[in-house]
Amino acid sequence: MTMMILTGNESAAWGARLSRPKVIAAYPITPQTSIIETIAEFIANGEMDARYIRVESEHSAMAACIAAQNTGVRTFTATSSHGLTLMHELLIWASGARLPIVMSVVNRAMAPPWSVWTDQLDSMAQRDTGWIQIYTENNQEVLDSIIMSYKIGEKHHILLPTMVMEDAFILSHTSEAVNVPEQKLVDDFLGEYEPAFKLEPGNAEGYGSLIMPEGPYMEFRYKMARAMDDAREEIRKTVEEFAEVFGREYAPLVEEYKLEDADAVMVVLGTIGSTAKDVVDHLREKGKKVGLARVRYFRPFPYEEIRKIARNTEMLGVVDRSYTFGYGANLYAESKAALYGHSSIPVKNYVMGLGGRDITPEILIKVFDDMLKIAREGVVDREIEWVGLHGDERWS
Amino acid sequence: MIMPLPHGDEMLEIRFHGRGGQGSVIASKILAKAFFMEGRYVSSFPYFGVERRGAPVTAFTRVDDKPIRAKYQIYEPDYVIVLDPSLLKAVDILRGIKDGGWVLVNTLKKPEELREVLNFDHVATVDATTIAIKHHLGSQAAPIVNTAILGAFSRVSGLVKIETVMDAIRQMAPAKREENAQAAKEAYESVVIGGE
């Protein structure tokens, strides 16, 4: 074990290095680039035994990872924002081909107007691609989640790719002390990659060919749906095994913080959850009973956890750092869907921090106060509220 | 034994102002490393992260005796470190500075002269540019002053030892590690603290 001062991106590169992927195919994009630069340096220094394929686009990067993983090796790539959306077609191919590729995604706003800062629309727009999605809150979680993602995805009853999200700059370019585990421990934890199937000379097989409507297309999709559902249990098992080997504990799908006797619970993704823990402590000292649920895995969606949390509180305030035009944002809409028929507590959507707008304790305190008011009165004033718009005096 | 931070439970927050190419971001990381080596929890980050040469750059370092969960910018710094004196006119470097906070500026001027300009009492100055040129850090036209100014910070704040700062520089400076460490030492010795 070595403690190092690493950025989120360096932590991602270390997570990849320790997992020993054999092929990395990537294309640079701010603010992801330092992940693949760090990996390129590892390979150039002989510290990592992998083939680095420079490609002409993110679409090609994913295509190269798919082809390489099909030959029976681990692969890794990283992207962000427009790079991720350009990959969209091949993301669906990767999961449909049941290839447990692992990819770092630095959540960055989509243009126009151009913004390199954080916003989760890029990965939210990939919700339906069949990838497992985990959102992280610090650099240690970035590194550890990459290792765990190979372990979970490679299980033969799962066989799904995973994207590991970091908020742009807030993690990608922020340096923190990170515990970098010994290679031997990671080797023992992950084991050799054992593909469920692979292309090899002398053993002719074909993948992804044409299938007629009466063929098993629908059955393939059903199996994938089952695998994504089964991933929940695999995640729960894996965080326990991880804690035993590495001594660091992670909540499985949702991290619960001070939920006991909470009158109102904020539900969040990513680094907002880190700041919000300080805010919860601060408000609790003042006698305000608030709690926090940091959703780590958005896919598979933790509907049972959300229902359980709703049973023990008076109100849920769901914070989204992205928006789904035409209705509330994804975390809100899905939380509410999970609660239908199970809970009648008020649920409100707070849309915040788009394009990297800073989410400070001051603004979170205002949101918590609004949530407590709704919990007391039992009435949601407006279902979906954009917080902190210029000129909106409610939040300034 | 770790010395308690001056304001008890409060986090120590430091803001760097520099220009792209001067190494403000790496300075914020080296300082974080130095505090880390003395047993603190640290976090450092740039405002922009894709700095263009010559453009104003802001970077931050947080230090605490407990894990740092704050994931937002620093608005009320305890210390402001200015790597380029021309920024005094271009940027509101005092924005949000705490009462009792300190400003450390790389300049030829004495603290008294800047106290009037800035209308702020706690000013320290160091000629990091001359020190950097003397140690052949960067070029005559664009000296790299980031390591020297960290030495000055050690003296002004008294919160991190100069030896630790020098060790952090030796571990993290991209090039000329010993020269960078010596520049920090020289700045430590030559910084002028207003009112001293």
Image: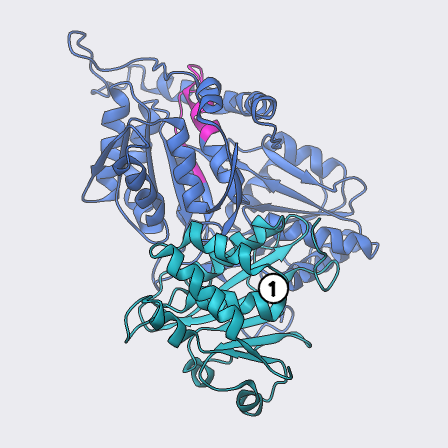
> A369 above or below A210?
below
Residue B96 appears in view: no
Image location (x, y in percent) of residue A333: 55, 44
Chain letter for the cyan part: B
Number of dots carrying numbers = 1
- In depth, the one of A5 and A255 nearer the eye is A5
Q: Which residue is mark 1?
A: B13
Q: Is residue A393 magenta?
A: no
Q: Residue furthest top?
A: A202
Residue range in magenta is A147-164
Q: Is residue A284 left or right of residue B88?
A: right
Image location (x, y in percent) of residue A225: 44, 23
What amino acid type is highlighted by mark number 1? Glu
- In depth, the one of A138 and A126 nearer the eye is A138
Chain letter for the blue part: A
Instruction: Find residue A9 and report its image quarter.
Output: top left
> A171 above or below B192?
above
Image location (x, y in percent) of residue B69: 62, 50
Q: Is residue B173 left or right of residue A346?
A: left
